[in-house]
Amino acid sequence: MDSERPTLNWRAIALVLAGIALTSAGHYLTPRDMRLWHGIFQRLYYLPVV
């Protein structure tokens, strides 16, 4: 019965969380004058989820 239960893939979860954390850090550490980079970092939030 336990073999039928799906297992969590901790490596995939860790990669998604790391991607979100790196994107957030880049977004919040970028100066406000660099509007283009803020837009790029906002779009990068989609990558770890997809």
Image: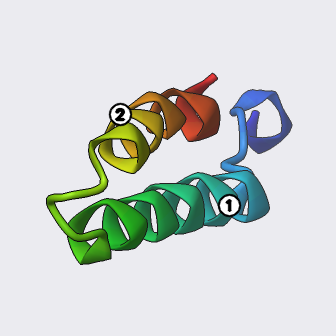
The residue that mark 2 highlights is 39
Quarter of the image that includes the N terminus: top right
Residue closest to the eye, 50 or 39:
39
Percent x, y of residue 31: 22, 70
Q: Residue furthest right?
A: 3
* Vertical comparison of 50 with 49: above or below: above
Q: In this view of the protein, which residue sits in the foreground, 27 or 8?
A: 27
**Of the two numbered discs 2 and 1 in the rendering, the one whose residue sits closer to the viewer:** 2
Which residue reaches farthest left? 32
Instruction: Kindly indicate the quadrant of the structure image that contains residue 11.
Output: bottom right
**Quadrant location of the C terminus in the rendered image:** top right
- Between 14 and 38, the one nearer to me in the picture: 38
Which of pointers 2 and 1 lies earlier in the amino acid sequence?
1
Please state if 42 lies on the left or on the right of 17 as rendered: left
Counting from the top left corner in percent of width and height, residue 8 is at 66, 49
Q: Which residue is mark 1?
A: 15
In the displayed structure, 15 sits above or below 48; it is below
CA separation in Å, label 2 and label 1 = 22 Å
